[in-house]
């Protein structure tokens, strides 16, 4: 317990101290110091991790030195009196939240990448250059978790995130005061946000949602401070907080855009420059890292805007379509899903949702219009991912607007009602049993009376399997994950199951080899007079539904197949980084367009010098007539000529290639595969691996329930 609390307090004290130093020891409120200091601490930690110099003694030593700045004398802050009724609403939830924050981490995303990547930093003392979906997200909140985990383990990271949830309460009360609300109404607005079920569960886990709300609101609060007493220094700190919103979550960039747009509209050029420079301190390192690794500064997103070989734009768009409606949930059902269900959108806001339209009454006041405008800006990312926790930044300001619209004494009464309806025992009466929310006070686990291992085995389904698998894996050994393991409790960071080009190609290869019947491959054979050729291109001429694929390309001269040269250059459209899969001599792999076939899509090979050829064969796994395309060669004059006028399809091959698929997996550096046995998605593949081990060439090494670890021979 001492280590957990110490790790969290050390991190928070370091951030607060750096913030006070940035404010020259005179912030208007300690929450502003935290909003300025956390980005600075994160930047220092990122620099150490990127340089591979994040040794525990150095990280903790620097945090300790920074925390020592708290000893510098400063004026005692004012201690505003809290209304007596607030204890009735807040104290029970403080106990509920604290118990859950201290307990071992069991929440899905936290037990995977939020803490899994931090655990790797602890092992390596560096941030890996691996290209994966989670790896390339900005990880500003996770850098703050890093020293906490070093000192106190995963629960210390949970406490750091919980601290941002707690700090949002005084921040919102200050926002309310600046907007003209009395203390009771301002505190009620803060409580409407903080006591919301989805805020409670996300804020007490090692997620980043509560941190994003805190820093987004800090930007708005500093704009209000500036409206009362304009100053360029205030906008410098607002820029720090706004840039860190992006470092926490990609969608947080809207806070920076909103701040900059406001300052430019007001023609405050110097303030806009200072805010932009401060924001870039947090934004630039993550974008620059992604640009160097992939060529896309906003990877793993924006792959249509910045085409690259690391991610397939089609799969990014597929994920975006799912997140925008969560599998077909209509907009008319969203209020019910947020207010009473809690399962469909992975979180519960509570019945307060049905009163939010009343917040529009705040439009009658200039201050209300400002709040609602900011809430609208923060609402925009939620339209792209309608999960409940992504609604929280906007909801916090809508709660303020609602309290502005209500009579003065109605706001505290509404908070008490909201608190009662948000208590776990009451939620049991009306919410979906599968709703993502807190269910009780795990004090025994929080105080470690219940051993951590026992608690995790009881509440995290995959925990036992991960511990068994960890005994087989060496530290940081590559693992192909077809399930989404809580790898914070593994000794490696697996690849998958979220998309990257590498993972997509591996999974496509395995899935195609999964069938019980052999697949047909069609040789598309093209012969032409012997000629010196600079390049050859297979080009699609007609559109059709489904992706176009080429399993293998073979080139011939007088009946003899040309050996592959490492000096040849490959290209394709789309996804040029995958072009090599059509010439790797493995029938299990293939180059594919990953989207519906369109005219002009092509696969091309450029010779290092003019080469005489007289035949080419493309092995096609899909054979509607329109998938044949046309074959072009580039002559010595660099003119393209169509040579496929007499081309035709030969006798189809009937092949199994389970072993070929495993050969490709091994070639990609994986000796281990984790999969679920049965069920939807990759579960069918896992079941096939388990039942046809000899056909695949794998060994079943660990099995626990419906999870299995396979070793590729």
Image: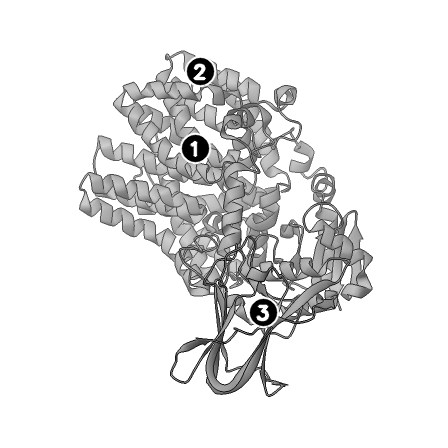
Which sits earlier in the primary sequence, circle 2 or circle 3? 2
Q: Position of residue 60 (x, y in %)?
A: 50, 54
Q: Is residue 182 above or below residue 29?
A: above
Circle 3 residue:
581
Q: For the residue carrying disc 3, how many other residues have a C-alpha within 10 Å: few (<14), some (14-19), or many (20+)?
A: many
Circle 2 residue:
412
Task: Name the residue located 70 percent from the left edge and 59 percent from the top edge.
Answer: 673
Task: Name the residue located 45 percent from the left edge and 37 percent from the top edge.
Answer: 382
* Secondary element at image label 3: helix
Q: Is residue 480 visible?
A: yes
Which sits earlier in the primary sequence, circle 2 or circle 1? 1
Which sits earlier in the primary sequence, circle 1 or circle 3? 1
105, 151: nearer the viewer: 105
Residue 694 falls left or right of residue 164 = right
Residue 6 falls left or right of residue 50 = right
Do the residues under discs 2 and 1 have CB atoms within 8 angstroms? no
Q: Which mark is residue 168?
A: 1
**Quadrant of the rendering where the C terminus is positioned:** bottom right
Q: Position of residue 321 (x, y in %)?
A: 51, 43
399, 274: nearer the viewer: 399
Task: Name the residue located 71 percent from the left edge and 40 percent from the top edge.
Answer: 455
| Alpha carbons under labels 1 and 3: distance apart | 51 Å
| Alpha carbons under labels 2 and 3: distance apart | 64 Å
Q: Is residue 655 above or below residue 463?
A: below
In this rendering, which labeled residue sits more in front, label 2 or label 3?
3
């Amino acid at each position: 317990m001492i280590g957990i609390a110490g790790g969290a307090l050390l991190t928070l004290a370091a951030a607060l101290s750096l913030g006070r130093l940035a404010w020259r020891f005179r912030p208007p409120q300690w929450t502003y110091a935290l909003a300025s200091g956390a980005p600075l601490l994160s930047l220092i930690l990122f620099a150490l991790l990127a340089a591979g110099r994040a040794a525990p003694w150095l990280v903790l030593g620097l945090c300790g030195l920074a925390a020592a700045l708290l000893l510098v004398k400063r004026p005692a802050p004012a201690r505003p009196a809290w209304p007596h009724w607030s204890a009735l609403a807040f104290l029970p939830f403080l106990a509920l939240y604290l118990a859950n924050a201290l307990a071992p981490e069991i929440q899905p995303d936290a037990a995977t990448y939020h803490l899994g990547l931090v655990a790797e930093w602890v092992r390596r003392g560096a941030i890996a250059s691996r290209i994966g979906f989670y790896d390339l997200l900005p990880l500003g909140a996770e850098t703050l978790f890093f020293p906490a985990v070093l000192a106190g383990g995963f629960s210390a990271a949970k406490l750091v995130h919980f601290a941002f949830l707690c700090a949002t309460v005084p921040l919102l009360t200050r926002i309310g005061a600046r907007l003209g609300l009395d203390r009771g109404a301002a505190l009620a607005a803060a409580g409407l946000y903080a006591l919301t079920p989805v805020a409670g569960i996300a804020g007490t886990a090692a997620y980043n949602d509560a941190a994003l709300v805190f820093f987004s609101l800090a930007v708005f609060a500093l704009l209000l401070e500036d409206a009362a007493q304009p100053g360029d220094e205030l906008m410098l700190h607002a820029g720090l907080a706004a840039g860190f919103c992006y470092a926490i979550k990609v969608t947080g960039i809207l806070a920076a855009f909103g701040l900059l747009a406001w300052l430019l509209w007001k023609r405050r050029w110097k303030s806009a420059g200072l805010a932009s420079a401060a924001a870039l301190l947090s934004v630039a390192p993550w974008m620059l890292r992604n640009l160097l690794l992939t060529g896309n500064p906003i990877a793993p997103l924006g792959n249509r805007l910045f085409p690259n070989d690391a991610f397939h734009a089609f799969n990014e768009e597929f994920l975006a379509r799912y997140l925008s409606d969560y599998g077909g949930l209509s907009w008319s059902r969203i209020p019910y899903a947020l207010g009473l269900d809690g399962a469909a959108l992975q979180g519960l806001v509570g019945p307060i949702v049905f009163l939010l339209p009343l917040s529009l009454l705040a439009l009658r006041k200039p201050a209300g219009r400002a709040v609602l405008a900011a809430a609208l800006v923060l609402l925009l990312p939620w339209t792209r991912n309608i999960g409940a926790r992504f609604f929280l930044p906007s909801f916090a300001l809508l709660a303020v607007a609602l309290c502005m619209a209500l009579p003065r004494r109605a706001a505290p009464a509404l908070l008490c009602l909201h608190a009662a309806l948000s208590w776990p025992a009451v939620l049991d009466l009306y919410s979906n049993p599968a709703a993502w929310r807190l269910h009780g006070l795990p004090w025994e686990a929080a105080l470690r009376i219940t051993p951590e291992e026992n608690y995790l085995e009881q509440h995290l389904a995959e925990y036992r399997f991960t511990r068994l698998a960890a005994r087989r894996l060496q530290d940081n050994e590559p693992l192909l994950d077809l399930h989404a393991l809580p790898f914070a409790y593994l000794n490696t960071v697996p690849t998958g199951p979220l998309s990257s080009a590498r993972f997509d190609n591996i999974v496509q290869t395995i899935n195609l080899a999964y069938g019980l019947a052999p697949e047909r491959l069609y040789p598309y054979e093209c012969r032409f007079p012997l000629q010196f050729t600079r390049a050859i291109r297979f080009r699609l001429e007609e559109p059709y539904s489904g992706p176009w694929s080429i399993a293998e390309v073979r080139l011939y001269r007088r009946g003899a197949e040309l050996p592959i040269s490492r000096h040849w250059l490959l290209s394709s459209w789309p996804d040029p980084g995958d072009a090599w899969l059509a010439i790797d001599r493995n029938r299990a792999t293939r180059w594919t367009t990953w989207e519906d076939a369109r005219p002009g899509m092509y696969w091309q090979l450029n010779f290092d010098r003019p080469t005489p050829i007289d035949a080419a064969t493309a092995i096609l796994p899909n054979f509607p007539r329109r998938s044949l395309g046309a074959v072009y060669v580039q002559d010595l004059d660099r003119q393209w000529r169509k040579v496929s006028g007499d081309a035709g399809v030969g006798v189809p091959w009937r092949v199994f290639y389970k072993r070929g698929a495993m050969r490709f997996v091994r070639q990609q550096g994986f000796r281990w595969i984790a999969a679920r046995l049965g069920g939807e998605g990759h579960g069918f593949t896992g079941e096939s691996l388990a039942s046809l081990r000899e056909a695949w060439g794998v060994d079943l090494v660990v099995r626990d329930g419906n999870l299995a670890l396979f070793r590729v021979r």
